[in-house]
Structure formats: C-alpha cells, structure tokens
Image (tube, rainbow, N blue to C red):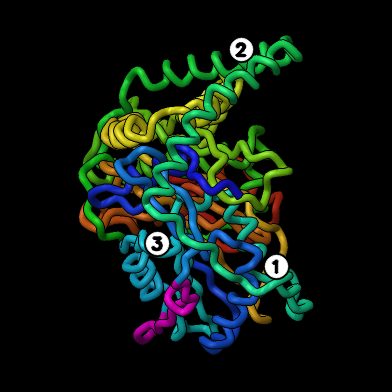
Amino acid sequence: MPARLTALDSSFLHLEDGGAHMHVAAVMTFDGPAPAYDELLDAIQARLHLVPRYRQRLAFVPLGQGRPRWVDDPHFNAGYHIRHTALPAPGGDEELKRLAARIFGQRLDRAKPLWEIWLVEGLSDERFAILSKTHHAVVDGVSGVDIVSVLFDAAREPAPPAPPASPWLPRPVPTATELLAEALLERTTVPAEAARGVRALTRAPRLVARRVARGVGGLGSMAAASLSPAPRSPLNVPIGPHRRYTWVDADLARFKAIKASLGGTVNDVVLTSVALALGRWMRDRGEDTEGLELRAMVPVSVRAEAQRGALGNRVATMWAPLPVGVEDPIACFDDVHAAMKGLKESGQAVGAETLTQLADFAPPTIMSQAARLQARQRFFNLVVTNVPGPQFELYLLGRRLRGLYPVVPLALKQALGIAIMSYNGRLGFGLLGDFDALPDLEDIATHLEEAIDDLGAATGADDRYGRTGPRRRPTGVVPS
C-alpha cells in the first residue's frame, strides 16, 4: 500500500468543507439476535491485519508542501471505532433510518483512523443492524466491496481466520521535520520518473501513442461536457451538516428482465428509474420539467482485476443525462440508453482517469484549490453510483446479512446522493439527503418504487420474471 495519498484521495479531504462529509457508508441488516459487543469487537480485531489501513491515521506535511501520508496510529484502540447503540421502540426501519442519518451527518475525526462500525440492537422482526462508514480518502465503492468480503464470512460456520504472522507493532510516527524532508525529496524524483517514461516511449511507441490518443480524446469529451453548467434544480442549494436517509429495496432479477426486454444494461434501467422518480418529485413541487435534463455524476471503476482488494480510489466519472422531463417509461429508457452508449464511445471515462493520473504531479496547494473550485461549480446535479456487490450470502458471526444499503457523500450545493449496490440477487438503493433542503426525501423514495413498477409493467418484464402481487397502471403510460 502506498503511504502517500494520491491526488484523488487527497481531494476528498479538501472537499470536506462546510456541510460536506466525505465518507462512504452503509446500513446492513442481519437476521437473528445481535451478537454481544465484546464478541463483535474480538471478531473484527481478529481480521484487522487483513486491512492494515484501518490502523493508520493521516500525517500532514508542514506548510502544505506535500500531500498527507498514512502512518500507524500508536494509540490505536478498536473500541473507539467499533461502537454500540440501540434503537428506541418500536425499533422499526424508520427509527433505524433516523439513527443512520444522525451518524452519517457526523464528520470523522482526522486525528484517528478514518472509520467507524456501529452495532445497533433493538431492531424489530428478530434483526439487528451494522452501520459502517469509512472516509472516501481510504476506500472507493468497488474496493469497499472487497473489504466487506474480508470482514464478513461466506459461510454460516466458517473456518477461523488465519492469525497474523506476527503481533502488530506500530511503526514510529515521523516527525514534522521528517515529513517535510520526505515530501521535498519526493519532488526531486519526478524528473527521474519522467525520464523513465521517455525510455518507455522509445520501447513501445505505438502502444503509448494509442493510449495517449485515447486519453486526449477522452479529455476532449470531458471538456465538452463541462463547458456548460448543469441546469438549475431544487437539488443544488447550500447544504448543512445534518442528513436524512432512506432506502428502497428492489429485485435484481426484475431489473435484468427489464433490461432483456429493452436492451442496454442494468445500469441504464437504474438511471431511468432515477430519472422518472426525480421528474415526478419535481412536478409535485411545482417545478417545470418540460424538456429538462438533469446531469448525474456517475463514478465508473477503472480498477483492474489484479487491483481488487487494494485500498484507495481507482474511479473515473461520466456525466450522465437524466431526462426528467420525459414521463413515458419506455421513451425515458431509450433516451438514457442512447446517451450512455454515446458517453462510453466518447471515451469520457478514459479522460477522467487521465486527469486523475496527471493530478498526482500537481502541487498540493493547486490540488486543494482545484478540489474546492470543483465543489463550487454546478457541473452536475447529483451523484448516482451503482456498485456491483457479492452475489452470495454473507454472514457475521453466523448471522445472515439480509439487506445492504449504501451511502454516497454529498458535495457542497448538492442536496441528494443516490448509491446503489447489488447483493445476493437484490438491489439496495440508498438515498442520502440534506436535512433542511429535502424534508420530502421519502417522497423521492416512493416515486422511485413507482418508477420501477412502471418500467416492469410497461415492458411486460414482470410477467416474464414471475413477479406476483397487485398491478398498477403505469403512471406515465396513457391507456389505449
């Protein structure tokens, strides 16, 4: 694991300003009685050697002369990070959502390792919950799946984890003088890295030329997408530190049946559902959506298979249009599918990855200002991130993981973030909203459920994949 934060990881620290909290998180519900706190503490401590970043904290270079680096926390105490609480009666999903919103609205302490896990008792229907949050500088959504797979079991009665080769002993924390000297020394190595790149250029000119061409084309596509700001919307207002949180649970087989009926991808169906839901919510608020197309920032993983399990961020972004003014489900899907196909062909994700790599050579002070500038520009209206999760049952101390609902952080002037993660045949939509700007967050969740129903009914996919239960006439379809 590299000790120095990458430019992208460092930018998440700079973005954490005002009411923004840059941690990714999740609500997980389990079957059965909650384990004892000490039992959970022991189980997680037994696996911390598999995720050594969880015992490291940030060390900041004096005078801002380098990006922060990770150092071992000499005072690490797992009991600080693994916490215990209980819900008030009746202990339903509403009480769990309110608790999750309160926890997700609290900033992580930068003087300690940047993660927390909460054991939540008092949940109804013979369940308990785990709330987790980890700073975005530590982990992105895709590598986060690997960490969850490490911390949990794939069998109800697994073999005990292999013990570490040796007891963990924290390495000495570098002094301020050492941090500064190390950062300045690293700057002198950049020319050597450039020379190494020149040698590679002479060895494989055509390969490099193709990569450069792809990167330049992608950068051009990104620049064109960013020339005009995203349209004004009730989602783009100043936010505070407090949050609301809710979720929608969906069947992955249903989304695959809709995809099979219409073509495209499951992600196209996800984005269409979000577009339909937001359009109805805006019209309920009296907003004019005629011809309106919101812009979603859609993170795309560029992590190679060989990099799975490594921490840090390997993501690029695409700007995905959400045609909220289109009320017909099929027409809305057609617009989304055509737009996403065009974005992939344009190389926009390649351009974004090129930018994140180039940023590693930018002075830290410039990166800080660039991150703050990006947070204040209206390049997108909201984030919609869809992360594939494990398609098999996971267990924690013999208790089955029932539901998994992710969280994507809010940036300044961005009042809504929607994160989606698949798990064991289900799709969990996690909706995080600013407390003051979105008092009607549950209405968006209701419209999302309706939009999924309408897509299933309009395509006939519900009949093909065997859905049972009452049918509704699709909201956006005029009966013949």
The numbered mark, 1 or 2, whose residue comes first in the sequence reads 2
Query: Residue under circle 2?
Result: 213
Furthest toward the right, the residue is 159
Instruction: In the rendered view, tell whether residue 91 sits above or below residue 276.
Output: below
Provide residue 151's location: percent of width, then percent of height. Answer: 63, 68
In magenta, the rendered stretch is: 75-91
Disc 3 target residue: 246
Viewer-proximal residue, 418 or 226? 226
Q: Viewer-proximal residue, 275 or 154?
A: 154
* Amino acid type, residue under disc 3 in the picture: Thr
Q: Earlier in the sequence, mark 3 or mark 1?
A: 3
Q: Position of residue 198 (x, y in %)?
A: 64, 15
Q: Which mark is residue 155?
A: none
Would you say residue 196 is visible in this rendering? yes
Q: Nearer the viewer, mark 3 or mark 1?
A: 1
x 33%, y 30%: residue: 366
Instruction: Give me the C-alpha separation between circle 3 and circle 2.
Output: 43 Å
Asked if residue 283 lies left or right of residue 215, the reply is left
Alpha-carbon span between mark 3 and mark 1: 23 Å
Amino acid type, callout 2: Ala
Q: Can residue 335 be seen in the rendering of this structure?
A: no
